[in-house]
Amino acid sequence: MPRILLIGLAGLAGTLCRYWLSGVIARRYGETFPVGTLVVNALGCLLIGLLFYLLQERYVVGQTARTVVLVGLLGGFTTFSSYGLQTFMLIRNGEFAYAAANVFASNLLCLASVWGGYTLGRLLGGI
């Protein structure tokens, strides 16, 4: 199967997972603060850190497999474009404290999640 098709299919799977998970969280916790997007981004960052370590450094797999997972699946799953739009809408609606909290929490949590996923991969690397 051509590489581009695999990436596209993985992106579709990631997108559908993002849509489902952010919807579940939004229904559970409400939509005043974009917690669904925050959770998806943090989880995506955790997974990209973990899978980068596992696929690139621990269990070296081919470039196509890494690209399909990291670019296709997780690229479709993470939602920084949604994060930008939701933050913009909070600012536009005068919700400056929520907008600032979203910027701070998303950036800090997602960076920490990438580090955490990478570290988790190293810790579990002996499995």
Image: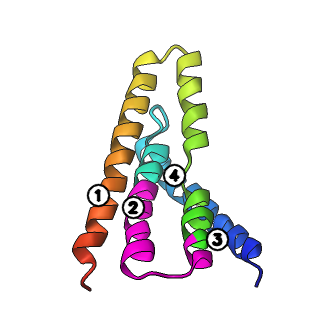
Please give the residue where the numbered disc 4 appears in the rendered image: 22
Dots 3 and 1: beta carbons under 8 Å? no
The image shows residue 31, relative to residue 97, as above or below, that is: below
Between discs 3 and 2, the one toward the N terminus: 3
Label 1 is placed on what type of residue? Gly
Name the residue at 34% across, 39% down.
108
Nearer to me, 123 or 84:
123
Report the Cα–Cα distance between label 2 and label 1. 7 Å
Please give the residue where the numbered disc 1 appears in the rendered image: 116
The range drawn in magenta is 43-66
Report the Cα–Cα distance between label 4 and label 1. 21 Å
Q: Does 65 appear in magenta?
A: yes
Nearer to me, 26 or 65:
65
Between discs 2 and 1, the one toward the N terminus: 2
Between discs 4 and 2, the one toward the N terminus: 4
Q: In which quarter of the image is the N terminus?
A: bottom right
Dots 2 and 1: beta carbons under 8 Å? yes
Furthest residue in direction top, as rendered: 94
For the residue labelled by badge 3, is the local secondary structure a helix, a strand or a loop?
A: helix
Report the Cα–Cα distance between label 3 and label 1. 24 Å
Please give the residue where the numbered disc 3 appears in the rendered image: 10
- Tell us which disc is closer to us: 4 or 2: 2
Nearer to me, 51 or 18:
51
